[in-house]
Image (tube, rainbow, N blue to C red):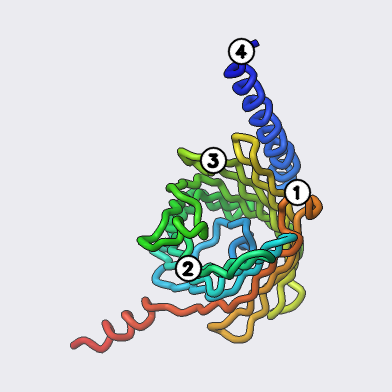
Amino acid sequence: MELPVIVALAAWQRRKVAIRAFAALLLVVMPAALSLPATAQGGPPFITDDPGTPGDGNWEINVAAYNERHPTERIYNAPILDANYGWGPRIQLKYQVPYLVVGTDDGPTRSGLGKSLAGVKWRFYENDEKGLEISTYPQIEFNNPTSSVQRGLADPGVRFFLPIEITKKVGRFEINPEAGYWFADKAGAAWAAGVVVAREVSNRLELDGELYATANTNGSDHWTSFDGGGRYKLGKHFVLLFMAGRSFRGPASGQPQFFGYLGMQFLFSTKHKKEILAGTNP
């Protein structure tokens, strides 16, 4: 058998493994969500997102630090700026950008601007009687005009993410699955799926657990992780966000031994101010 044919068959086998892993997670996540009798609980500090939006004229701005530890490398997103705006009751506009700091055991520490992420979430289905919300959240990831790619801080190219999010509720527990695909010309094409399960412990505190998995379509990388965290309301406009987790696989896999998120969420509205100003007009 000629070498190109062998290489093609090997690549196809890796793709099948990635697709099977993704499909297995979907088989666990989606039926569980749809069988439950809805407020959204995904989104920061978690990887999995949800159908929730800030609301018409409302801002949700998250400022946070993220740390990822590998056997010989440490990656920091410090800070991450994540700005979200509610354009109507069912649409959310998003822009996110991190500042990266990468350190290794045998090299100098590097830092610079990471890739930007911009998206539009649309909650296209909402049924209060059934307690079901469904949204889609197209997002595009692109490099900024800096030297981060040349210095190895960011991957080259543009990626486009097309997911579906669902939120359901039963008693004091809430379940929020998300599944989607990263479109990319290079090795960045991948399936992604996750689920967040949450419980409101008190009026101020919410605790959550998450399972998340990604699988590159070329079979080069798989990441399956678990984490726990939550949100603590410090006031009407301030929410503390926290999360910590690790991959299921060991250090030899190259996946993170630890990852964590700590940040603050700022909530405010411009619509209310506009209505007050409009009411003062003669």
| Of pointers 2 and 3, the one earlier in the residue sequence | 2
- In this view, the residue in front, 3 or 209, is 3
In the image, what residue occupies the spot 74% across and 45% down?
Answer: 32
* Residue on which disc 2 sits: 112
The residues bearing labels 4 and 2 have C-alpha atoms spaced at a distance of: 45 Å
Crowdedness near tag 3: few (<14), some (14–19) or many (≥20) residues, C-alpha within 10 Å: some
* Residue on which disc 3 sits: 187
The residues bearing labels 2 and 1 have C-alpha atoms spaced at a distance of: 26 Å
Amino acid type indicated by mark 1: Ser
* Residue on which disc 4 sits: 2
Image coordinates for residue 163, horizontal then vertical, percent: 54, 46
Amino acid type indicated by mark 2: Gly
Q: Is residue 224 above or below residue 189?
A: below
Looking at this view, name the residue that lies furthest to the top.
1
Crowdedness near tag 1: few (<14), some (14–19) or many (≥20) residues, C-alpha within 10 Å: some
The residues bearing labels 1 and 3 have C-alpha atoms spaced at a distance of: 18 Å
